[in-house]
Amino acid sequence: MDLMQFVPMFGNFAFMIAAFVVALSVIVAIHEYGHYIVGRWCGIKAEVFSLGFGPVIYSRTDKHGTLWQVAALPLGGYVKFLGDANAASVGSDDSVDPAHARRTMHGAPLWARTLTVAAGPLFNFILAIAIFTGSIMYQGRATEPVTFGQAQDLPAAFTSELQSGDQIIAVEGIPFTDDGREESLLELLPLQENLTYTVIRDDRQIDVTGPYLMPTLISGLAPRSAADNAGLRIGDVITAVDGDPIFAFRQLQERVIAAEGAPLDLTIWRNGRDIDVTLAPRITDEPQPEGGFAQTYRIGITGQLFFDAQTETVGLFEAGRLGVEGLWNTATTSLSALQHIIVGQISTCNLSGPVGIAETSGSMARQGTQSFIWFIGALSAAVGLINLFPIPVLDGGHLVFYAYEAVTRRKPSDRAVQVFMFLGLALILTMMSFTVLNDTIFCR
């Protein structure tokens, strides 16, 4: 079942809000459950587990005496432990009973408090790894040698003689896969509509004709990009730019870069009919394989081969390794982007706040269930990372307090904690206000 079928029913805005609430609720629930369950394992009693803020619309008390509730404002959540003065676990219980104090957050040993606080971001990372791993296992990976599965839905001009089961050995005499060469196959191929494919079919090597390897078929849309805002969809084929026919994704890239931000008139083939769309490329900061970022004009689409390759199952351990690698890449790219923003090397438009995240949620949900689930994984990784920043109010700020306690053998005073919490909250609200302005005014 694809989420796209529900868009007309709810309307774009309502659909966007629904997608945002679902994504945020999943991530917050996992984050707070991490705090709750590890705290319980460490002997700390949780009084309230709340998904959302404000008026309570549903609640129940479990056998451990924890009140589980769903509140009306689904913009976060919290766990209130025994003895906490508030939901942020700031303040302490004045009880002198050692047994009672041990069950509170403030009376628990340092190791128990540290594990409980660190568990929230850790559970976000676990969710991200689980989603990335599951996605890899679901999609599989292309067999070696690459074997033709089925052609994508393309206009009639893109003809192919390849058949399911053909093992692709070479294209225009160039080996299809060659780990030793520095250039990609697409850089070496001649720019022509039809290419010669050398394949193994029924144990015989033959040459057949097929379309350009990577046509102008849209396989992915960057949320909030020019293409996304213009209404382009996955599966669209761009057949002309400013009236000039094109057939290769490379041609489209060249036209986009050459336009330098000027509007382009695109002819789109969609489900057998042509649609005209006008959009303007935007300067985009793209992470580079060797590190850093490069600015170039983009409309926000990705391409793919003109066919689906046959796949093989990826084992759990290999998929898990790739899932961890995906989390690492997400974290390092995010930190690198933040560093480049701080030093002014890339635009602050790369920062998104609640509005931008909501729009991205809706965009990814419109692209399909699989894309939306992957987005939840990526967002969960980002939330876990942000919560580790050493800012009071965030989990990372609490961990800094605990590090101070471990070094000095004494807790920071309640007054100092309150001051730092106020400063941290002011910083968070300032950043949130800035990102909201970014999303609604500065970066439109």
Image (cartoon, rainbow, N blue to C red):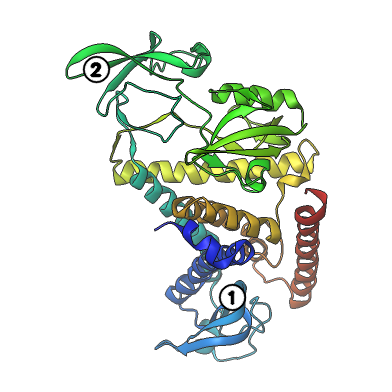
Identify the image quadrant of the N terminus.
bottom left
Foreground: 174 or 351? 174
Residue 310 percent location from the top left of the image? 30, 33
Look at the picture and state if 337 lies above or below 193: below
Looking at this view, name the residue that lies furthest to the left.
203
Residue 332 percent location from the top left of the image? 59, 42
Total tally of numbered discs in the picture: 2
Q: Seen in the image, is 306 located left or right of residue 55?
A: left
- Image quadrant where residue 383 sits: bottom right
Say which residue label 1 marks: 78
- Image quadrant where residue 174 sits: top left
- Would residue 114 be seen by someone viewing this image from the given angle? no
At x 42% / y 14%, what residue is drawn?
195
Look at the picture and state if 249 lies above or below 401: above
Say which residue label 2 marks: 200
- Image quadrant where residue 121 sits: bottom right
Look at the picture and state if 199 lies above or below 372: above
Instruction: Look at discs 1 and 2 and give the one toward the viewer.
Output: 2
Residue 197 percent location from the top left of the image? 35, 15
At x 52% / y 32%, what residue is drawn?
303
Work out whether mark 1 precedes mark 2 in sequence or the reverse, and give the earlier one.
1
